[in-house]
Amino acid sequence: MTHSVIEIRISAEDHRIARLAAAAVGLSLLDAAIPTPLPGVKPGLANIITLYVLARHGWQAAAWVTGLRVVVGALLLGQFLAPGFFLSLAGAVVSLSVLALAIRLPKRWFGPVSWSILAALAHIGGQLLFARLWLIPHNGVFLLAPILAATALFFGTMNGLIVARLLNDAKSTTP
């Protein structure tokens, strides 16, 4: 009887993605612990990692980090395959789609802050649309849009400023 061995080679990129995804999961758990006045109103701290990865390592790496964050965060919070998981997944997919386009915009006018705002607005838009299509089959769900868009604008701006600072600090410490 012969045994076959499957060997999986783990690259430095795999290690980097795992470390960044772990940081994103940690921030996602912190996000979940912050009390919120309305469902869906969260700072989106894990998006800081996504945007940093996008700027430093590209869209594919950001998509991996985001996907791992959504799945692992849901598993750790006991929400895997629950409505909250699908809302988070819908927001992440729409946000990543918008970021795929946003990174192609002129760098002179668009960077981490504008990417963050666009991603936050896309995230909440994706969640609202998904909620309307699956959870709340009534257009009244869109009455929350102005409040959620305002919070997305605020937190998107704050997170983008943090990412811009992190990128600037990383640039100044790189030889």
Image (cartoon, grey):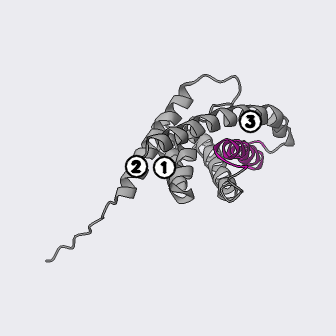
Tell me which corner region of the image, top left, top right, bottom left or bottom right, holds residue 114: top right
41 and 19: which one is in front? 19
- Local crowd size for mark 1, using a 10 Å CA cut-off: few (<14), some (14–19), many (≥20): some
Say which residue appears at 50% left-offset and 34% top-offset.
Answer: 27
Judge whether residue 166 can be spotted in this image: yes
84 and 66: which one is in front? 66
Q: Secondary structure at mark 2?
A: helix
Residue topped by disc 2: 18
What is the spatial separation of the Cα atoms under label 2 and label 1, in whole angstroms? 8 Å
Residue topped by disc 3: 153
Residue extending furthest toward the bottom:
1
Residue 63, image x, y percentages:
55, 55
Q: Which residues are magenta?
A: 109-136
Mark 2 against mark 1, which lies toward the viewer?
A: 2
Q: Secondary structure at mark 1?
A: helix
Magenta region includes residue 141: no
Residue topped by disc 1: 68
Q: Amino acid at mark 1?
A: Leu
